[in-house]
Amino acid sequence: MFIDQVKVHLKAGNGGNGIVSFRREAHVPLGGPFGGDGGKGGDIIFEVDTNKSTLLDLRYNKKIVAENGEQGKNKRMHGADGRDIIIKVPLGTLIKNDDTGALLADLKHVGQRAIVAKGGKGGRGNCHFKSAKNPAPEYAEKGEAGDDINVKIELKLLADVGLVGFPSVGKSTLLSVVSAAKPEIADYHFTTLVPNLGVVKVNDGRSFVMADLPGLIKGASEGKGLGHQFLRHIERCRVIMHVVDMGAVDGRDPVQDFEIINKELESYHYRLMERPQVVIANKMDMDEAEENLKRFKEAYPDVEVFPACTLINEGLQLALYKVADLLAVTPEFPMQEEEEQGVLYTFTPKEEDFSVINNGNGRWTLIGPKIDKFFEMTDFEKEESVRKFGSLLTEIGVDEALRQKGCMDGDLVAIHDFEFVFEE
Ligand SMILES: Nc1nc2c(ncn2[C@@H]2O[C@H](COP(=O)(O)OP(=O)(O)OP(=O)(O)O)[C@@H](O)[C@H]2O)c(=O)[nH]1
Ligand SMILES: [Mg+2]
């Protein structure tokens, strides 16, 4: 089974602690602070590797942990930085924060790298805190914690051209004769479970990446067959090569086939029908092929068709020129996430449940979406409901937060127009 989605927990290295130490040497009576800084925690970096085509290696690696920075050393020496971890992924990999859904990296260029989980900074040793007032500081900073996130890694195949059609129409055969790819070819349906990529070189020197995709069937856009999970791989293809079996080897009607597949592309929500199509009339060596092609042309007079016999690589060169021409004039289609997200490589901070505002004179205000929600759900006429409201606030940490900010017994806390007296 083709792995195109994996969830992994990433823990970047923590920064090492700075240390407290003092210079003690013979003949140096007042040796000052001498504690060094902690090292930086290791980052977790994702990098495009064009030799990879699946996320398979990540499947068994549920948690990836980068090394922590070492703590600082005496004599102002830095602790060693934690080693970074570099995870190689195929071109076209998307990494999302699994908790918030935010897109963290969109790896679509050869050699591209993205730091997805950042290691913590090392804490400063006490040698940094010396001042006239405090010539011998007894404290040092702790290291910063490294990012700790759950990510969802998705692979969207990155091909310029996608081969689309019913099962067994000869998509993989086509890819195998125009590129060095060696996909499995057989006369049973759904031979291709994993999309294969091949680099196609046209005789005039132009080249592009082609993907053979698993066969589509009627209802694929609603999840039937294997089509559904792979339709989204077509999203990034700029041109579609639509292969039709003119030999009608499986007993279907090629005229209908063409319409059914286009309907599926249309029903899928990624505007797949907006991509230009190059139509291949395959298996022209079969007896009924000529007759079917004639009917096909009558049914779709405006569609340019390239008759071919992929088995012996016949009739494909013109179609490949056509693809290269179309690629030259067809821009990339923005993907759904990009349109929604706008910005890439952003971390969305977790939304706070509430905030505490100090109004002075022992008066405080609480605001925030969770508080509003509880507030709306509470009937302030009923004692029990009010009590429940109180315990919900405690549950999300309101008491603790108020106390931390300096709220004292007897202070007044307001939520909208409701006020209560704070007591421990
Ligand atoms: N007669 C004839 N048979 C062909 C031709 N091209 C491919 N075939 C045969 O058609 C069968 C299916 O070919 P594949 O290339 O595996 O078809 P596919 O579209 O990739 O099929 P799936 O991966 O199952 O969707 C194989 O038995 C091929 O040998 C052709 O031009 N003529
Ligand atoms: Mg195939």
Image: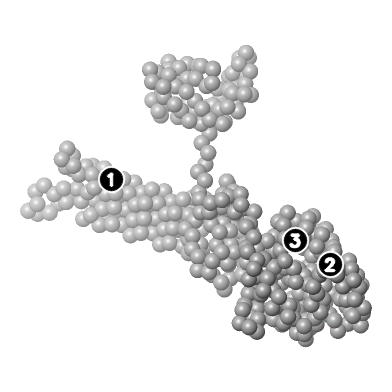
Comes first in the chain, label 2 or label 3: 2
Comes first in the chain, label 3 or label 1: 1
> How would you rate the neighbour count of disc 1 (Cα within 10 Å): few for under 14, some for 14-19, many for 20 or more?
many
Give the camera-side residue of 264 and 191: 264
Q: Is residue 341 at all visible to an observer of this figure?
A: yes
Comes first in the chain, label 1 or label 2: 1
Which residue is label 1 attached to?
140
Disc 2 on helix, strand or loop? helix
Between the C-alphas of marks 3 and 1, the distance is 62 Å
Q: Which mark is residue 69?
A: none
Which residue is label 2 attached to?
258
Disc 1 on helix, strand or loop? loop
Q: Amino acid at mark 1?
A: Ala
Between the C-alphas of marks 2 and 3, the distance is 13 Å
**Position of residue 270 measured from the top left corner of the image (x, y, whole percent):** 70, 56
Q: Residue at x 29, y 49 (%)?
A: 124
Task: Tell whether 235 sits left or right of 422.
Answer: right
**Position of residue 27 measured from the top left corner of the image (x, y, whole percent):** 7, 53
Task: Tell whether 48 sits left or right of 139.
Answer: right
Q: Quadrant of the N terminus?
A: bottom right
Q: Amino acid at mark 3?
A: Met
**Closer to the camera: disc 1 or disc 2?**
2
Task: Tell whether 231 sits left or right of 122.
Answer: right
Disc 3 on helix, strand or loop? helix
Q: Quadrant of the C terminus?
A: top left
Which residue is label 3 attached to?
273
